[in-house]
Image (cartoon, coloured by chain):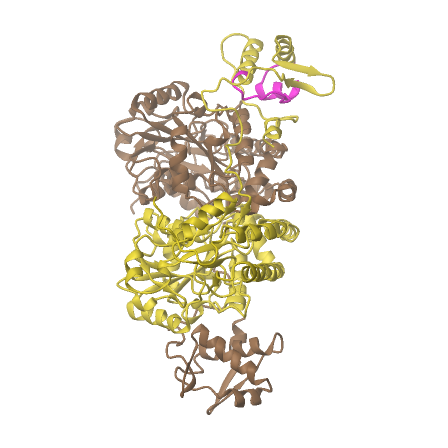
Chain colours: A brown, B yellow
Amino acid sequence: MAKSWVNSAERIGADLHLELSASGGRRAALIDALRAAVRDGRLAPGTRLPPYRSLAADLGVARNTVADAYAELVAEGWLTARQGSGTRVAERAQPPRHAVKGPVTAPPRARAPRHDLRQGTPDASAFPRAAWLASYRRALQQAPDEVFGPGDPAGRVELREALTEYLARARGVRTAPDRIVICSGFAHGLRLLFGQGAGGPLRGPLAVEAYGLGFHRKLLRVAGVRTVPLPVDEQGARVEELGKERAVLLTPAHQFPTGGPLHAERRAAVIDWARARGGVVLEDDYDGEFRYDRKPVGALQGLDPERVILLGSVSKSLSPALRLGWMVLPERYVEGVLAAKGEREAWASVLDQLSLADFIVSGSYDRHVRRMRQRYRSRRDRLVAALAARAPHIEVTGVAAGLHAVLRLPPGTERSALKAAAWQGVALDGLAAFRHPEAGTEARAGAGAEDQDGLVVGYATPSEAAFGAALDALCEVLPPDGQTGVPAAG
Amino acid sequence: MAKSWVNSAERIGADLHLELSASGGRRAALIDALRAAVRDGRLAPGTRLPPYRSLAADLGVARNTVADAYAELVAEGWLTARQGSGTRVAERAQPPRHAVKGPVTAPPRARAPRHDLRQGTPDASAFPRAAWLASYRRALQQAPDEVFGPGDPAGRVELREALTEYLARARGVRTAPDRIVICSGFAHGLRLLFGQGAGGPLRGPLAVEAYGLGFHRKLLRVAGVRTVPLPVDEQGARVEELGKERAVLLTPAHQFPTGGPLHAERRAAVIDWARARGGVVLEDDYDGEFRYDRKPVGALQGLDPERVILLGSVSKSLSPALRLGWMVLPERYVEGVLAAKGEREAWASVLDQLSLADFIVSGSYDRHVRRMRQRYRSRRDRLVAALAARAPHIEVTGVAAGLHAVLRLPPGTERSALKAAAWQGVALDGLAAFRHPEAGTEARAGAGAEDQDGLVVGYATPSEAAFGAALDALCEVLPPDGQTGVPAAG
């Protein structure tokens, strides 16, 4: 495309020789050619253009065609026409100082690692393309026309109804469609709650688990919300240490990333806290559907729908590419969240919302989750078996659930294990990457996971075909038995 | 429709969340759990229960335990068992005693007006369902697996490449794929630019046209950005009155809503201003593809890609339901916008992005725009003709373009015309609804459109079948010749 701009015009003295492209009308071709000449700087600002008659004769086009083309370019600001001085290239039509970067190519992509065991995504090769397309087709064909008009900021009611039923059945959530707001995923939900400077209903500081996703903490920090770390042990977050915060963000089904479910007593305790203090619990139900040793623990939200905000999405169960999530809200927050969303902003693709509703109602969602549950369970079993055989000194912590596992390492070996992994082309994170920057102090005082070394293994990420090799490579980079870490020098 | 979702769990193997208490026998615990699920509405009347075998496997109990529990609940009247249709929740099983608001129904919708002439949306009945589905199918089938993994916050490169070519061809935009950031629409673009408390690259105050969309102004106000009105006349915004602002938001192709294109000299002048002051022009190219009397004026962006941010979307050309838009950025803003977007937030559905890329590249987008251009042009012609015949004293202002027209009314008649319209079931807005709240002072000082009465008629909004009746109804509510307004008392 850039090519066509070049060589299309050539100035010979006061005359102007233009090559008009053969396709399209004469007038459009002339406009393009003139615009290109000015743009490339080969028609300098102030240059007087030939009169209509002579250019028309040169090019073998009608005079009116030239007149129209000049008028168009005057309207666009490329040329100026002043009585008595003819048509000239506008003084400001200078080419941009920095020519636009070209050519038209994709930006360099980060090279995919040889073995991708980073946490956070489902097996991208397992997206149920045929079933999703069937739902999309049904949704598109059955949609009433109003679907293509302005949307409801809360999201399509069909999806909110399907979620109400599904979440009650699968996660023990108690809600109603008018308590659900559709969003683009967990991070979008957080932004809506804490305002984007835009007055979401919640205010910081927010207590968070001492281990969690750094980009959630960053998003909150940028939004002006202070986060306060809550120590984590094998029974989940130590909610009894909640301080003056009015809100706490938890991963009750499966602490992320350390892997313990929130203990029953702590579940009750945090609800008591919220009732006594007028507080609210944010429940990040990121992988609640994936429990392998028994039925999943129900959502905390079921214990008190007026004290818990449940956030979920299809990012782990289907794909982050859909950008579909939901917030299940206590009644008092619905209005504030919708206000933060904005009256004309539906955000999530309405057709995808309708497809997901169909996907759930038709049973495809259950079938897919069930299939993936078997797949991930078998991968976790293979991971555990491989470690038992090849690195019996390395413990897999947490319950059998989710899309990742934490391998506990001998103290002081995390950094060298990560270096070895990088060397072998194995992409994964260490526990340190998830630690709250202020979590250190309590860690040294009490017990808990804070001072542990470990690797977070996203066993769901590779394709089925690639998993075996990734597992082998992982075993290669684990520290041998008896090794203790050398204090890192830098 | 609501009904069909309630009974949606009709399938084998539906996931059902049950928690069996540890005390007492398995059979008693299962009976209690099922009873509780029915009682609080998590299992809706009519819902089909999983077969013995699968529930038994899920819960880790014997098959007979499940069979016994079902039989007991059938006996109690909670469930029904019918040959060939399995075991279902009885229809008269108790309604939910929700702590939450229920029952599960759609919230009341705002009643659709009889004649919808509100501006802002395309004809929702004209969405090209078949062509879109074809693009979606191709995109879904051809997508590499990595599409379903974490996305690029800039958006899919396939779409950015398709837009680079399309916008150059159709709108005279000069850019490259790495200068384009995909977003969910114009409002999302504004949020990314002005930061959401999150540090977008621009800062207020922002000069805006004295007439524009109130929800854009509100969005900016909530984000802490002060807007300063710029008077508007029949040649567009009076950019020569720009003050100390470093950014200005314009609708150069077709001033919204008053309808004039920005005059050539003003186009040049605003670029000069941006260069001299280190400022930036935000170009809202909301309906640039729809010009009926001649070729559209090219985008201002083409005059200086380093001084203009072009924002566009498919909300007018296809449907706001897709939530797809784009920002064409000067190089210096790309990084800041991506930072505001957040590292893990793709926002717009990746599958829809790929579909739109296919839709553009395959020529379907051009075909659809051409078809809609003809349709809207004919509607505008019918509007002009109807007024000429039935209300010749009412002038249609602005150029023949876009999805709406402004009817200039006799001074002081706007409010009464709107009341008459509401009475007749005609939904539309008056010019006053678009006036910047601070625009009054300059208006009284200078000339311009500020003190004009008028109706903004969204002639694109009705379906083809409904347009004629809407046009008739509109003619009925226009003030008769010679009427002048009575000052409204309240």
Residue A112: horizontal and vertical position, in percent? 50, 51
Residue at image position (56%, 85%) is A63
Does residue B54 belong to the magenta stretch? yes
Q: Nearer the viewer, residue A259 or A414?
A: A259
* Camera-side residue of A392 and B38: B38
Seen in the picture, residue A184 relative to A365 is either above or below; the reply is below
Q: Quadrant of residue A343?
A: top left
Q: Residue furthest front?
A: B482
Q: Is residue B57 visible?
A: yes
**In the rendering, at what x and y percent does residue B187 appear?**
42, 51
Q: Residue at x 51, y 26 (%)?
A: A171
Q: Is residue A33 visible?
A: no
Residue B484 magenta-highlighted: no
From the viewer's side, name the closer residue of B15 and A378: B15
Foreground pick, A396 / A277: A277
Q: In which quarter of the view is residue A366 placed? A: top right
As drawn, A191 above or below B6: below
The vertical placement of A456 against A113, above or below, is above
Residue A36 x, y percent position in the rendering: 49, 77
Q: Residue at x 52, y 78 (%)?
A: A69
Residue A382, percent from left and from top: 55, 33
- The correct choice, above or below, for A36 with respect to B472 in the image is below
Q: Quadrant of residue A98?
A: bottom left
User: Which span is picked out in magenta?
Assistant: B39-63
